[in-house]
Amino acid sequence: MKRKWVKLSSLVMVTALFLAACSGGNASEGSEEKVTASTSGKPQILRVSIGVNDQHPEYEGVEKFKELVESKTDDFEIELYHSGQLADDRSAIEMLQLGSLDITIPSTSPLVNFVKEFGVFDLPFTIPNEKVADELLDGKFGDKMLDMVEGQNLVALAWWENGFRNLTNDIRPVAKIEDVDGLKIRTMENEIHLDAWKALGANPTPMAFTELFTAMQQGTVDGQENPFPTIELSQYAEVQKHVSNTNHVYTPFIFLFSKTIWDKLTEEQQTILSEAAVEAGEFNRQRNREVADESLEKLKKSMSYTEVTPEEHKRFQKAVKPVIDKHADGIGAELVDEYLNAIEEIAGS
Ligand code: TK8
């Protein structure tokens, strides 16, 4: 029953595409004219797609976004779609580019397939804690990264939180690197994650998030890695026995808007939307942290929990260091330096 979204997803997808085709999408309407409530008389529908389910703090964030926008203007009606009903992260980004979806808030990791510079956030063990994450993303470096989606027919409005990622698997408790050996681990569709898990001795395979539960259930993969809220609220305990606090990478969520749609809005509308995206992001971040603690406590009851010691964390860190060196040039050596220096500066202050 819980998995009904997975089974329904293809039907819903077809329906969504059909509806998008029927409405013609805002993209194909007269390009000179601004599409606003004042011209059409009806609120413009903005569809938001996220991959996680409606129990997740990311969904609490989009509910907040909806509430904020709709309380400030009658111009928009925000429609929320969770559990990848409309699309997985990567396809949702493509739909934004086409103007057939308005908003998505994916992990930055699949975005690397469009803008390679986002790979900085995939470099393992670089962001040490949430305080550094906040200052980095809310500061100059974060702003610069938001601007990077320009040229991809996307507008990035805010940083939200997915959180520190942790390993689960169905084979054995993982306390040290050697325990990872040979585990079939699903990663996001991202070369840096693949290389990091290879460096740790795992047998990684990239896959969309929407396929993951079934893959674990059928044993196509032994494990996966995600922040505690996602692990707990996606009911992974049903198909995974062990969880460890590997904390290996902090990957943010990024609030993306279709530029095709965005460019047709008035400045006033854009301000309302972008302020709501930031404010809802702050709410999401705060809720995510509360939920992460609660989720860990619940996971300790439903799975076997293994603590990775600080010494062992250092060994993990050392083992994946060559992955950072290997990918620095591909991401942009200067940008990687800027990222690492910014972190050092914040962490040292
Ligand atoms: C949700 C995804 C997901 C991510 C993943 O759309 O794929 O593992 O962590 O939460 O962005």
Image: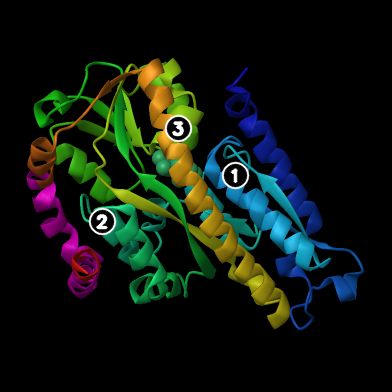
Q: Assess whether residue 164 is covered by the magenta stretch.
A: no
The residue labelled by disc 1 is 59
The kind of residue tagged 1 is Tyr
The residue labelled by disc 3 is 294
Q: Main secondary structure of the magenta part?
A: helix
Q: Assess whether residue 321 is covered by the magenta stretch.
A: yes
Give neighbour class at mark 1: few <14, some 14-19, many 20+ (Cα, 10 Å): many
The kind of residue tagged 3 is Glu
The residue labelled by disc 2 is 127
- The boundaries of the magenta stretch are 318-343
The kind of residue tagged 2 is Ile
Q: Nearer the viewer, residue 214 or 234?
A: 234
Q: Nearer the viewer, residue 47 or 338?
A: 338
Give neighbour class at mark 3: few <14, some 14-19, many 20+ (Cα, 10 Å): some
The location of residue 309, given as percent across then percent down, is 14, 33
The residue sitting at 11% across, 59% down in the picture is 325
The location of residue 116, given as percent across then percent down, is 32, 63
Circle 2/circle 3 CB separation < 8 Å: no
Q: Residue 87's quadrant in the figure?
A: top right
Whether residue 337 is visible here, answered yes or no, is yes
Horizontal arrangement in the rendering, residue 138 relative to residue 196 (left or right): right
Horizontal arrangement in the rendering, residue 43 relative to residue 191 (left or right): right
- Real-space Cα distance between discs 2 and 3? 22 Å
Q: Quadrant of the C terminus?
A: bottom left
The residue sitting at 79% across, 76% down in the picture is 30
- Real-space Cα distance between discs 1 and 3? 17 Å
The location of residue 46, given as percent across then percent down, is 72, 58
The residue sitting at 47% across, 74% down in the picture is 150
